[in-house]
Amino acid sequence: MLGNVTKIFGQLQGLQQTLKELTVEGSAGDGLVKVLINGQQNVLAVRFDPERIRSVEPAELGSLVVEAYNQAQMESKIKAREEVTKTTGLNLSNLPGIF
């Protein structure tokens, strides 16, 4: 029994590290705004196309950042779910609120 708990704990620690290192990018405005996040949903970077950003109104830019983040977050959740399934063998896709 203790061996199983130790094994599961090790798998979860490895999974946390994998999710921390997993990165995805969301973009909006045809690449004007890019948001990079990891599998733990932490924002790693927000990038703007310097040639095109000058012509964008602040309100529109804010909307594009939100759109790019939402896209990245959705992709990150999909990839995190895949990693959990791969690591644990459990398919959590039908459990609401987990991913």
Image (tube, rainbow, N blue to C red):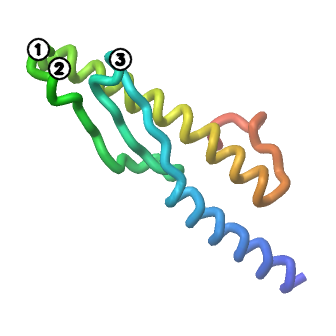
User: Which residue is rendered at x = 56% and y = 66% of the image?
Assistant: 17
User: Which residue is rendered at x = 9% and y = 20% of the image?
Assistant: 54
Sequence-wise, the earlier of marks 2 and 3 is 3
Q: Nearer the viewer, residue 70 or 24?
A: 24
Q: Nearer the viewer, residue 7 or 28?
A: 28
| Gap in angstroms between the C-alphas marked 2 and 3 | 11 Å
Marker disc for residue 55: 1
Query: How packed is label 3: few (under 14 Cα within 10 Å), some, or many (20 or more)?
Result: few
**Location of residue 35 by image quarter:** top left
Q: Which residue corresponds to mark 2?
A: 52
Instruction: Estimate the x, y position of residue 76 in percent, counting from the top left.
Output: 54, 41
| Gap in angstroms between the C-alphas marked 3 and 1 | 14 Å
Instruction: Estimate the x, y position of residue 1 in percent, counting from the top left.
Output: 90, 82
- Direction left: furthest residue: 54
Asked if 40 appears above or below 60 in the picture, the reply is below
Mark 2 vs 1: CB contact within 8 A: yes
Marker disc for residue 30: 3
Instruction: Estimate the x, y position of residue 96 in percent, counting from the top left.
Output: 69, 34
- Left or right: 43 in relation to 55: right
